[in-house]
Amino acid sequence: PPLYQQRYQFVKSYVDTYKPKKVADLGCSECALLHTLRFWDCIEVLVGLDIDEDVLRRKMHTLTPLAAHYLEPSKTSLTVNLYQGSVTQKDPALLGFDLITCIELIEHLKADDLADFREVLFGFMAPFTVIISTPNAEFNILLPKCTGFRHPDHKFEWNRREFQSWATEVAECFNYRVEFTGVGEPLQDSKNVGFCSQIAVFTRNYTESEESLKRKMEYKSVYKTVLHAVY
Ligand code: SAM
């Protein structure tokens, strides 16, 4: 399967195994991952956030319930919310999540935005699990037409050492543990370049106090709601 599907498959396997109830996808673009997750039994709340409202609107109709969904209601209800906003902004709409995914997002962030994002995601949103994927620069020698970065909007592409040192420091700083894996394996005979997309899975080491959560809930909303659907 194409690489993007392998990344979604990775998330779907995680969801199958750990059964998160509240799931958010940051930098969700045309909502393709959310679309594949919308009828997963365990999921009760599904949220997408992107800075680009046009890209959100392009396919968001695929996330709204059809008449048939009301005629044959599913056992558990599902709420889907799409927001326009930046991952550098704190908004209570993203508190209390079991899983937050950031698939091919961080390489689009400038250095100061990446620093804010780290604090917003791990310090403020502080979900139980975070899955981050990003290109592995070492793999680029195997991509035929790739000179420079894989996409003109990428602000950086990290090798394994760079990604792992960033992620390890984040984990230490915010009291998470982190494991590394990836998708898109090189052919057998090629050099040891690692996966095409590298992935870090972070798990929170602590339970957040009611008090801390309550304090964060009082933050002012800043995201713009683009879709609110209840199944
Ligand atoms: N996650 C999608 C997927 O796997 O199909 C694609 C991600 S696309 C390569 C990167 C997305 O991040 C774009 O839709 C872009 O608008 C969004 N983005 C970039 N900077 C952002 C920011 N500061 N806050 C939220 N989204 C952002």
Image: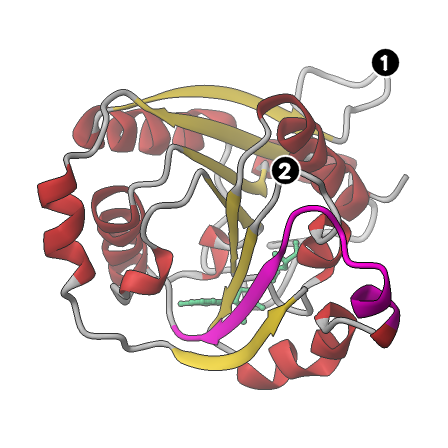
As drawn, the label of residue 15 is none
- Placement of 129 over or under 35, stated as above or below: above
Distance of mark 2 from mark 1, alpha carbons? 37 Å
Residue 13, x across and y down, in percent: 70, 28
Q: Residue at 10%, 54% (x, y): give it.
A: 215
Residues rendered magenta in the picture: 68-85
Location of residue 37 in the rendering, given as x and y in whole percent from the top left corner:
71, 48
- Say which element carries label 2: loop
- The amino acid type found where label 1 is placed reads Gln
Q: How is the image coloured?
A: secondary structure
Q: What element does badge 1 sit on?
A: loop
Q: Is residue 174 left or right of residue 20?
A: left
Ligand 1: image quarter: bottom right
Q: Which of the image's four quarters has the N terminus?
A: top right
Residue nearest the observer in this picture, 169 or 21: 21
The crowding category of the residue bearing disc 1, from other C-alpha atoms within 10 Å (few below 14, some 14 to 19, many at least 20), is few
In the rendered image, residue 29, in percent from the top left (x then y), is placed at: 62, 67
Q: Is residue 57 left or right of residue 1?
A: left
Q: Is mark 2 within 8 Å of ligand 1?
A: no
Quarter of the figure with the C terminus: bottom right
Q: Which mark is residue 188?
A: 1
Identify whether 13 is placed above or below 131: above
Q: Residue 157: say if magenta.
A: no
Q: Earlier in the sequence, mark 2 or mark 1?
A: 2
Q: Quadrant of residue 69?
A: bottom right
Identify which residue is drawn at 70% across, 76% down.
Answer: 60
What residue is pinned by disc 2? 42
Q: Residue at x 45, y 60 (%)?
A: 155
Residue 30 spot, x, y in % from top left: 69, 69
Residue 82 located within the stretch drawn in magenta: yes
Instruction: Name which quarter of the figure residue 218 lies in.
Output: bottom left
Ligand 1 within 8 Å of disc 1? The answer is no
